[in-house]
């Protein structure tokens, strides 16, 4: 098993930046692909970005591509989501999640961290 804890959320004005962290504990960090999702009030949870296991290949939702960067630091068992040029529509609770492969379900989730972007 792996445990995930997010941090780094907060309140920021449009155009600003935040960096979210997802710290993993338990099984070997590089055994999992890590993704970020978000859920805004009244909306379904949506995919934001993912980084694969040891190769570190990344994928992004179209709405954040070019503004957000996901990267992992295996020495710290942490995946980061650097968010730049934030928009009010980025306001949501952000969750990190882990899965063992592209063909498996996300079996592990963090508790979420709130990001609020004011216009």
Image: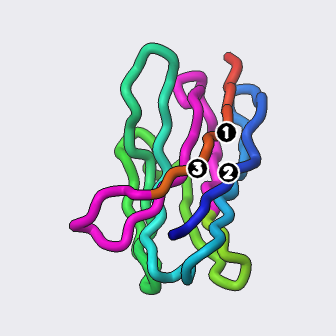
Which quadrant does the C terminus fall into? top right
Specify the label residue 51 is tagged with: none
Q: Secondary structure at mark 1?
A: strand
For mark 1, what is the residue?
A: 113
Residue at left 65%, top 71%?
25
Label 3 vs label 2: CA separation? Answer: 6 Å
Q: Is residue 9 above or below residue 119?
A: below
Measured from the top left, where is residue 26 in percent x and y? 61, 74
Residue at left 38%, top 44%?
47
Q: Is residue 106 magenta?
A: yes
Q: Nearer the viewer, residue 94 or 32?
A: 32
Q: Is residue 58 magenta?
A: no
Which is more foreground, mark 3 or mark 2? 3
- Circle 1 Cα neighbour tier, 10 Å, few/some/many (<14 / 14–19 / ≥20): many
Q: Is residue 37 above or below residue 58?
A: above
Q: Earlier in the sequence, mark 2 or mark 1?
A: 2
Region of the chain picked out in magenta, as a range:
80-107
Q: Quadrant of residue 93?
A: top right
Left or right: 37 with respect to 4? left
- Does the residue at mark 2 contact the one at mark 1 (Cβ under 8 Å)? yes
For mark 2, what is the residue?
A: 6
- Does the residue at mark 3 contact the one at mark 2 (Cβ under 8 Å)? yes
């Amino acid at each position: 098993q792996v445990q995930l804890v997010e941090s780094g959320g907060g309140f920021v004005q449009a155009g600003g930046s935040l960096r979210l962290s997802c710290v993993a504990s338990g099984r070997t960090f590089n055994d999992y692909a890590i993704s970020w999702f978000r859920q805004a009030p009244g909306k379904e949870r949506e995919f934001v970005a993912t980084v694969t296991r040891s190769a570190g290949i990344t994928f992004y939702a179209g709405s954040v591509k070019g503004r957000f960067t996901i990267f992992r630091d295996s020495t710290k068992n942490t995946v980061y989501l650097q968010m730049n040029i934030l928009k009010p529509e980025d306001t949501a609770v952000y969750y990190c999640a882990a899965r063992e492969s592209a063909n498996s379900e996300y079996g592990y989730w963090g508790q979420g961290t709130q990001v609020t972007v004011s216009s």
